[in-house]
Image (cartoon, rainbow, N blue to C red):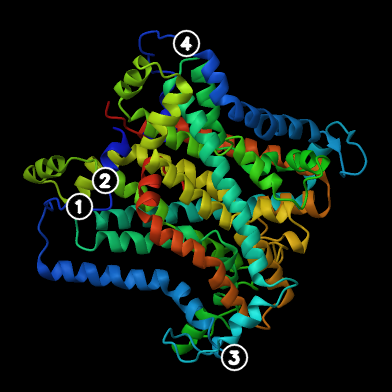
Amino acid sequence: MTDLRERTHELPAPVPEKAVKLPGAGRSIAKHTGLILLTLVMLYPVIWMVVSSLRPNEEIFRSPGVLPDSFRFENYSEGWTALASPFGHYLINSAIVVLGCILGNLVSCSMAAYAFARLEFTGKKLWFAIMLGTIMLPIHVIIVPQYVMFSQFGWINTFLPLIVPKLLATDAFFVFLMVQFIRGLPRELDEAARIDGAGHPRIFLQVILPLMLPALATTTIFTFIWTWNDFFSQLIYLTDPEMYTVPVALRSYVDATVSTSWGSMFAMSVVSLLPIFLAFLVGQRFLIKGIATTGIK
Amino acid sequence: MSAIGELQRLNTSTGGPPRKRDTKAALLFLLPWFAGILLITAGPVAASFVLGFTDYNLIQPPEFNGLENIQRMLTDERLHHSLGVTFTYVFVSVPLQLAAALGLAMLLDRGMRGLPFYRSAFYLPSLLGSSVAIAVLWRQIFGAEGLINQMLGFFGIEGTGWISDPDTALSTLIVLNVWTFGAPMVIFLAGLRQIPVMYYEAAQIDGAGRWTQFRRITVPLLSPIIFFNLVLQIIHAFQSFTQAFVVSGGTGGPSDSTMFYTLYLYQRGFHSFDMGYASALAWLLLLIIAAFTAVNFWAAKRWVFYDD
């Protein structure tokens, strides 16, 4: 197996290789019909939710179709104000957590990656193995003592337990992603900078970082999506409704309004998915390259 | 190379020629990472090992109780039940998900028209799948009067309340996990791209059919990637939490049929504040995942093929 990244660099533009066996036109049409049907089946639930978010409640339980038939925009205004604070409050809370995590990951993971990719030090192999091992460590194993520790710091119901770990490069997945990227950069660049008298901090900041932009973009988008979706740690650390982020707020909404107003619940679900969808549209290239390189959801 | 390939080969690679050490710079660059390992990862892992032998409710200081938590695990029927639920979930949903991922990746391979479109459409659910919003949607879709039953009703079939029926509740979560096959599919696509077309051409000249080509070329050459996806998706599935939590309203019901291991751990730790027992549970989860990963790595020697 050769380095995936090198080969997948050109990813989104598919190389029109000659197919091994040219399928006949009939077969090709059948294949596309099948794939389009499957696409519809896959995306149907989501499309149906978006359409249903504009339907009156009784309609939701009667209309399996996805043709927009009614437009009850009140679902959105009702959903927006259904909880103790307007939904915008939770969006802002989520945005703060997400921004903090992105910043933390970018700074701390790129520093660690530079060390693993370019520096020589005692026990490097062992540390590197430990770093890779932590990618597979489930958060559930550490959550109890972590909770005890953070509660002694008085950090429960603050965003610190969510952000501070990212400042300490605990998302090893990104360290690995960046190590792989830096390894692919020609060493001659570092050598040239070194001959010009640059030390490691300068080589890192002025040579490596600017060349790492694609890896940094991948990190940004993944951190955004994962943090935005993350429920487990936010549920544990944020119990004061004032501090709720979007997933926790949405979940408390489910409990508060069980089956009474699906319309507004769908409306807020759509609102909560919108940033993910936008990140997907903007960052598809990096997402696909990123998982093709390192292969984690 | 994937993180896992890297791990497998760490001890076999020979380092290059000895180079000047940059210990000082390394310390500086790794400072945050070392702090993280100490405070956020290794420290808590060690602490939860110790706490696993205590009775601790967050208010009184932890009190050693020897092997009591382990004895309790042996007789805790809800725990055994939740292990059963989790194993069923992992061993049904992961193979289905990977089979879908590989199947679709093979259909989409090699510069077919519309590939970026299909790839994006199939990938999108992987990004949405772990959100609370989709879990909310699932609650409706598989509810007694939900979308699925509306559609079945169209054909004159009367469905059950999929989520309120203990016999079917877990299947709805399995469907949800299979629905997110897009991420492993993208990894398979990247892997398939690296198999030289000439292998297939040569095989065709030798008269090999599609099935033989799949068995003799695709599977061996893709095996590192299949392995990687398998390990990762198993670990990932063991840790599923959000969907079961939201779909069951935090209870793991009906009649504990969606009581994932992580959900049980959450209930013991953060509902009953039974932190000592929860720590012991966390360690059991770590051991289970480590054992499965080890078995995977061991079995990999027999079927994973590295071409270098």
The label number, if any, that marks residue B192 in the structure image: 2
Residue B224: percent from left, percent from top: 35, 37
Pointer 2 and pointer 3: residues touching (CB < 8 Å)?
no
Which chain is home to disc 4?
B
SS type, badge 1: loop
Within 10 Å of disc 4 (Cα), the crowding (few <14, some 14-19, many 20+) is few
Residue found at the very far right of the displayed protein: B60
**Residue to which mark 3 is pinned:** A58
**Camera-nearest residue between A10 and B64:** A10
Q: On the picture, is B189 further left or further right than A150?
A: left
Residue A224: percent from left, percent from top: 52, 53
Pointer 2 and pointer 1: residues touching (CB < 8 Å)?
yes
Q: On the picture, is A97 further left or further right than A223?
A: right
Pointer 4 and pointer 2: residues touching (CB < 8 Å)?
no
Pointer 4 and pointer 1: residues touching (CB < 8 Å)?
no
Rendered-image quadrant of the N terminus of chain A: top left
Q: Looking at the picture, which amino acid does disc 2 mark?
A: Leu
Question: Do callouts 3 and 4 point to residues on the same chain?
Answer: no
**Camera-nearest residue between B128 and B71:** B128
Within 10 Å of disc 2 (Cα), the crowding (few <14, some 14-19, many 20+) is many
Q: CA distance from mark 2 to mark 1?
A: 8 Å
Q: Confirm whether residue B301 shows in the render.
A: no
Q: Looking at the picture, which amino acid does disc 1 mark?
A: Arg
SS type, badge 2: helix
Looking at the image, which residue is at 28% across and 37% down?
A: A6
Residue B137: percent from left, percent from top: 56, 72
Which chain is home to disc 1?
B
The label number, if any, that marks residue B21 in the structure image: 4
**Camera-nearest residue between A280 and B174:** A280
Q: Looking at the picture, which amino acid does disc 3 mark?
A: Glu
Q: Earlier in the sequence, mark 4 or mark 2?
A: 4
Looking at the image, which residue is at 77% across and 53% down?
A: A157
